[in-house]
Amino acid sequence: MSFATLWESLLPIGRDGLSGGYRRFSWTPEDAACRAWFTRAAAERDLRVLTDNNGNLWAWWDPPGWPGPGAPGGSKAVVTGSHLDSVPDGGAFDGPLGVVSAFAAVDLLRERGFLPVRPLGIAAFSEEEGGRFGVACLGSRLLAGAIEPGRARALADTAGVTLAEAMAAAGHDPDGIGPDDGLLAAVGAYVELHIEQGRALADLGAAIAIGEQIWPHGRWRLDFTGRPDHAGTATLADRHDPMLPFAAAVLAARKAAAAHGARATVGKVTAEPGAVNAVSARVSAWLDARGPDERTLQTVVGEVLAAAREAAAGHGVQLAAGPESVTPAVVFDQDLRERLASSLAEQGIPAPLLPTGAGHDAGVLAARVPTAMLFVRNPTGVSHSPAEHAEPADCAAGVRALATVLEDLACR
Ligand code: GLV
Ligand code: MN
Ligand code: MN
């Protein structure tokens, strides 16, 4: 089956008719439809599908005569894939490009007559974006033991539904979530193909890159609690308005990021109770901060929180602030990276090395398994937006590059 057929079969799921963006949040009906799509794509290829304890999907192409999962002495698997969930109104490519390309690469290997000599897996990790429960890469974090299962079960969405409740409602047992050392021990390498979330490849004139490192990054929640009051009668001097220190924090984020060569964004904010004609009772904001190294990241976050505290004190507002998820700097496995580079070079596929400020399951898994990434050119660099795009010819180049790498890692 061609990449285009597979791609188009996924495209309608979870697309918002008005914005054209995707709303594929974990453990919702749209998520169930994505899971059914994955299971169908695997079944069409005679791949063995399983859902792990954490709700991540796996499709296995077992080598002929392979004794089965957990058999002693079996060689370690090579896994590729990405995620199918989205940010609110996200683009079509972030995540799905890696999963669709994985199935298409299996098709291409078969067309070329290759068989794996070690298990070849395709994974789709759950809640990579943290779009519903707030913690990025939740499925891979749970798998790798990078978040405590009790804390994960208690994470709640904006309607107050916990992860445990959402999983149970979707038919998945939340009591079983947590690290799966056996599964990870069976994986020898993870290679994630992803759309580039910047414009570097367009500027370099190349279709494919190899990931070099991921900037350290994280999310911090800031709750400003003031005193609700009347917009017309409360004098300015009498107010305890949480919106003002919130605004100061947003400006401080921009200033600190610019001063330190970092990124800081406030993309989500809620004001309660949300009356036009009242001073808010509470403003909650989420700071996403990223930097080229840990020290810079800490400096940026420190400056933003200090400015928020100072402004809160000046307005008689309470501030509670803390991290929701933090991912340290990741440098992808050098041996694996070099192996990708030489197999691509052998096929005449140019692939420069690129660092990224975007987070990925590959970054979380890198703590436990040798991981690598391939990026596919995004002509405008826009991502986490309906405008995210990759040209069909570049998607095809991505599939060829991934097949080349998988042939080397899994078929020889
Ligand atoms: C994931 O795309 C992230 O970097 O937030
Ligand atoms: Mn993303
Ligand atoms: Mn992604």
Image: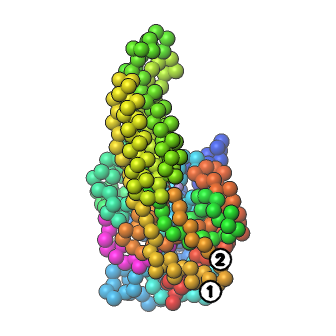
Q: What colour scheme governs how the chains and residues are painted in the rendered image of this protein?
A: rainbow
Residue 319 in the image, given as x and y percentages of width and height: 35, 33
> On the image, which quarter does residue 369 sit in?
bottom left
Question: Disc 1 marks which residue?
Answer: 346
Give the residue at x 35% y 23%.
316
Residue 350 got which mark? 2
Choose between 174 and 224: the one closer to the eye.
224
Residue 206 in the image, given as x and y percentages of width and height: 68, 70
Choose between 267 and 77: the one closer to the eye.
267
Please report the bounds of the magenta region as a residue range: 179-192
Position of 226 compared to 63: left or right? left
Position of 387 compared to 31: left or right? right
Q: Secondary structure at mark 1?
A: helix
What whole-number distance in Å separates the C-alpha atoms at marks 2 and 1?
10 Å
- Vertical comparison of 60 with 39: above or below: below
- Vertical comparison of 101 with 390: above or below: below
Q: Quadrant of the N terminus?
A: bottom right
